[in-house]
Every structure is written in structure tokens, then in C-alpha cells.
Image (cartoon, rainbow, N blue to C red):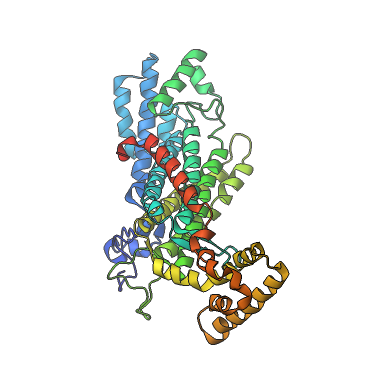
Amino acid sequence: MDVNTGLSSDTGLGITGNASPIAAGPEEVLRYRSPLVSRYASKEMAYNFSDQKKFQTWRRLWLYLAQAQRVILLSKVTINRLGGCERFRHRSPRLCQHNLGLCCMIANEICLLRTHLILKELKKIYMPLLPGCPSRPLCVEMMYPFLHRPAQLTTVGKRSCLWLQDLCMDLCNLERVRNDLRFRGVKGTTGTQASFLQLFDGNHEKVEELDRLVTIMANFKRAYIVTGQTYSRKIDVEVISVLASLGATVHKICTDIRLLASMKELEEPFEKDQIGSSAMPYKRNPMRSERCCSLARHLITLVMNPLQTASVQWFERTLDDSANRRICLAEAFLTADIVLGTLQNISEGLVVYPKVIERRILQELPFMATENVIMAMVKNGGNRQDCHEHIRELSQQAAAVVKQHGGDNDLILRIQSDSYFAPIHSQLDQLLDPKSFIGRAPQQVSFFLLLLFIFSAAENPQNME
């Protein structure tokens, strides 16, 4: 963090500051710049929304159309005309489209490229988390399902697998959306292909062949059969819905990390010279997780924009879809890119503190074991109601020691000192073994990781050697 500017440079902390007011030049400091690009986004994703990328894609698509027309022996398209496409660089896009009779097909292709980048980032995240799951499958952890109150035990590996499972669902959804993306194709101004049919003197086969050739040149397997002036805005809904769902996953993971960090059971990477607070030198805030939660909330809210845009379109298209898509689509992909990059940084450096976890479990385990104590007494001929009353009284006394006097939980000592529980005194160590409270969590973790390993090996065999 630069103390003068308040902006971060590339520090390896999951922060990718691309610029600062000092380096931006006198003109830049007078204009607002989105922090998504100026502070956080990767160069690859930021480039995908640059003017250069947009104009290059336009020119390439114009060239594809001209090349395809020449393949179909359209005499009007000459070699000189093909070369002239490159000279459209500084001209109005609409004038260029008019000259070549091309409706904009750029959105599908760039959307595909952006989705590829998000998938690439997502696949980087769950791999670093895998080693931590099998290495600590029996590192017992506390569950807090109700108002952050202790309820039952789980394992660190099981909790990590729950995170991974959600990420895998997002991965599958992203791949589905990517594979479902089609090219708008050569459909003309309002989707009827009337201008191209006229261009080919009413030859429907040539129009279809032109559509097919340009689709292949643009690296798409399929094109939409019918479109309006644009592709259906439902596609934007599909894409951003998946990204918003990913945002929910990241927010949940990072919220868990923040809660565990507050109890000092788990900690995200903390650099040697990192400063948690200018006023409180001891602070070690989970700043990456906090940033992920902050940006993930923004990503989640973006899904309402394409939903409303798709719902209010008139007939083949109305132009009120244009301005907000420039903002919404860019922010959705940039934000997803940022939270994934930061989550990857977190996952590669997570630190678990087993001794802290053990201490917390020892504070709560005696209360959790009361049901096991009652069952053991019943098996030895005791009356359940009498046993329950004895346990209740001893539990209240132990709770008073903890809450009113700040002492340790002495419930087990009280049970050992009570002659009523003499029949099971020899079983107490077994009844209090934390591993007896985690059920099949270790087996579930092992099986889940096996399936995930097989899936990863099938997707990227070169990375699994």
C-alpha cells in the first residue's frame, strides 16, 4: 500500500494495481477510472474490454465475411477489397459495416473468450485446495450451523470439500454456458438475411453457406438459426447468472474463512511486511477474504440488469439495451476475474492452526458428549430420565464456572466425581474421543477427492502425472 496515494501496486497479495495517480499522468487524475481495472483486474481480462481488442475483433470479422464471400465466388469481393479491410481502422464502425453489409457479430466471440478466461481462473483455485483436504481429514473442526453456536463436530477436510463442491458446480455451469454459446452468424440487419439473399440473387444455399463459413472462421461450432437485430438478450442472462452464482460461492467461502480467522483457527496468507492497521499494529485482518466478499456482493447484484434488459426488449431489438450492457457485461467479467484471482491467492496460502481448534473443542466437547453419556448409562441399566436430570444439573454447574468465573469446562471432572456415573467411568475416554463425533466425514472426503482427481485427470491429464 502506497501511503501517499492510498493505492496498491502488484505486491503478490492478490492485488493487481495497474496504475496510480502519480503514474497516470496529469489528464488521468482529472477523470474517474473504475477501480475494477485500475486496481484489481488481471491484464488479460482488462485487455478483453479494451478498444484495441474491440476494433481488432471488428476488423477480423469483416475480413472473415469478405473471405467467405470470395470463397462462394462473389465477384464483387476482390483481393484489393480484402486488403482494404485493414484500412477501416480509423473509420466509423457503422460506416465499415455498411460498406460490407455486415451486422455486428462481435459480442458472441468476445463473450466466448471472456468465459474461457473465467474457466481458466476457476480451475486454478480448486487444485491448490486439494492437498489440504487429505492431509488433514481428521483435523476435527467445530460446526456452527445455528446463529454461530456450537452444534456438532466436522473436519477441516470436510469443510474444504463443501467449498470445492460448490466451486465444481460453478465450473460445470460455466462450461455448459461456454459450450452453449453460439455465433450470431451472418443474419443481416434484423435477422432475416434479406440483404444477403439479394446479394446472391435469391440463392438460399449460398446464403446458408456464407453463414456456415463465417461461423467456422470465427471458431464457433454452431450459429443461432434465428436472431433479431442482435442475439437474444437471454444469453446475457444465462452468462451473468452463472457469474453471479459464482459470486455467491466465493462470498460463502470467504465468509467462512473470515469467521474462522476471527477465532484464530484458520488464517489467510499474511506477508511479513503487511500492515493490518495503521492504528493497531497487532491486527491481521483477512483482507483478501474481505475484498472477495465486497466484490462478490457487487457481482451478485449485476444479474438483475440483464434480466430487466431481456424483459423489456421490443420485437427484434430496441436500443435501450446498449448503454447498460457496456457497463454490466464488463463489470461482471472483470469482477469475476478479480474474485477468482484473489481466491486463488487465498487458497494457495491458507494456514490451519490445529492447537487452537483442539482447545476450542475441549471447551465444548463435554457438553456435546452428554448424549453419549446418557446412552452409555442406559445400556448399563440406568434410567434415562434420572440420568438426564443428573447431567442437566452438572452441566449447569460447569456452565456457571465457564461463564461467571472464566474457568475451564469441568463437566467431565464432575461426572467422574459423581458416584451415580460409576458404571461408565471407565468408558469416559472413549465417549469423549472427538473422532467418534465426526461420523463418515473422513470417508466422504476421501471419496469426493478421488472423484475430483479422476475428473481433473480426464480434463488435464498432463497436470496429473
Residue 264 position (above or below residue 77): below
**242 or 348: which is nearer to us?**
348
Give the position of the N terminus as an image quadrant: bottom left
Quarter of the figure with residue 93 = top left
Residue 415 position (above or below residue 135): below
Q: How many marks?
A: 0
Quarter of the figure with residue 7 = bottom left
**256 or 112: which is nearer to us?**
256
Q: Is residue 394 left or right of residue 136?
A: right
Q: Could you say where residue 179 lies in the image, as x and y percent from the top left?
A: 47, 33
Q: Residue at x 39, y 19 (%)?
A: 69
Q: Residue at x 54, y 60 (%)?
A: 437
Can the viewer see residue 260 in this picture? Answer: yes
Q: Could you say where residue 295 lies in the image, as x and y percent from the top left?
A: 46, 59
Q: Residue at x 63, y 35 (%)?
A: 315
Q: Could you say where residue 318 lies in the image, as x and y percent from the top left?
A: 58, 40
Residue 47 position (above or below residue 390): above
Q: Could you say where residue 461 lies in the image, as x and y percent from the top left?
A: 34, 35
**348 or 409: which is nearer to us?**
409
Quarter of the figure with residue 372 = bottom right
Q: Is residue 379 left or right of residue 55?
A: right
**311 or 452: which is nearer to us?**
452
